[in-house]
Image (cartoon, rainbow, N blue to C red):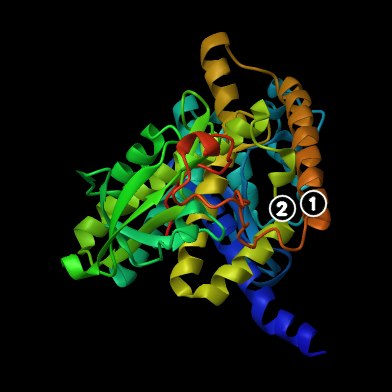
Amino acid sequence: MDTILNFLTGQLPVFLVVIGVVVTIHELGHFLAAKICGVGVLKFSVGFGPAIFKKEVSGTEYRLSIIPLGGYVRMVGDMPDMITGTSATDSSVRAETEENISEIDKDLSPAAKALIADKSKWFLEKSTAKKAFIVFAGPLFNYLLAIFILCVSAFVYGVQTPDGTKVGAVAKGSPAERIGIKAGDRILKIDGTEVNTFEDIQKRVQSSNGQAINVLLSRGDSKEDANQEEVSVVPESRESKMFKDNKAYMVGISAGFKSESVGILESISKSFSFANAMCIGTLEGMLGLFMGAVPLDSVGGPILIFEVASQKAEQGINSFLLFLAYLNISLGVLNLLPIPVLDGGHLLIFAIESILGPISLRKKEIVQGFGMAFLLGFMLLAVKNDLTRDKDFLKPKEEKWSEESSFGKPAEDNKKNEALQEVPVVAE
């Protein structure tokens, strides 16, 4: 009973907030762009299902619905089945009379019927540029919301930046742990050469080619000789896609981070940089998925979103904000993929029409049917993964390291050791 109560009062509201905010802001983008471009909007709903509250203004019904899982926008003349049925063609849609429309939408108010009757308010009658702007505005608003969230996070909580050569974490069983390197240590020199950043450390470790390296440490932030210690460590190797020869060497440490306060202008600048990096990372992940480089079992659906949202909320407000920003970026990028039914698919059709001329609504429906089938299959895969995924999927994975001691061993005896590439931990 306590578990169910905790779910209803804690985890479920967090999930509903995440989904509701992300989808509603997306639809708000379409809605505002439609208004700007002079397209009539019959309904703008926050949520789905029966309305808790609704009010009509100038033919547009604003609704707050009972199921808080997003929202939707119904524009005038944006798809055939809203006006003439699924068998409509371009010519039949544009030839519809006010009387025929009235027969189909008997429950509409006079103001709404007037919107439908005014062909100048139809989405189909707008220029390609205006239609593209309305479609693109959804993903754009997700991106802008992510920027806003990141700005708030940076301004309130500061930004996380690498703390020089400070060690943030040491992997269990790694060469670094076996020779006594600890979190909080600073690496001063490698093989007598001074290092100033964690990138310098990575380059020196990678260039070792598995040979033993001498590392000069300082315990804590003090660089006094009394707190310094020199150790010898042999990097281990494993295949990596980040290096041309597919072999990366590491000793099992990750970078330490520090929080820096920033002003409003700097927070905006850093937010754009971070959001753009998120966009690129999301695109790379999706491209890797379609090319087979990313496993299909990594695809997550609503259950995974629910679990991650709950986890981030437990970690604190800043972690939750960063996750919300990432989810907005992911949804925006996903919607811009050139797949029929998605916003990117519509933009692709607009581009084709601008070159080859108008495409009939019947052909668009057929293409969108294939797109819908693809998305349905993708969604089923995501749900299947959610239901069959290991319950410890979200827990940090402990990497396996060679059990042989790497201290004082000749380098030639350690060439067969395997490990992961050394990558700084992304701090939140």
Q: Is residue 59 left or right of residue 214?
A: right
Amino acid beneath label 2: Gly
Examine the rendering and report whether any part of residue 267 can be seen.
yes
Q: Which of the image's four quarters has the C terminus?
A: bottom left
Count of labels shown?
A: 2
Displayed quadrant of residue 357: top right
Q: Secondary structure at mark 2?
A: loop
Image: 377 above or below 367: below
Displayed quadrant of residue 349: top right
Q: Earlier in the sequence, mark 2 or mark 1?
A: 2
Circle 2 residue: 301
Q: Looking at the image, which residue sits at the far left?
A: 224
Q: Is residue 382 left or right of residue 340?
A: right
Examine the rendering and report whether any part of residue 124 can be seen.
no
Residue at 79%, 83% in the rendered image: 4
Circle 1 residue: 383
Q: Position of residue 369 (x, y in %)?
A: 79, 30
Contact, mark 2 vs mark 1 (Cβ under 8 Å): yes
Q: Position of residue 63 (x, y in %)?
A: 63, 65
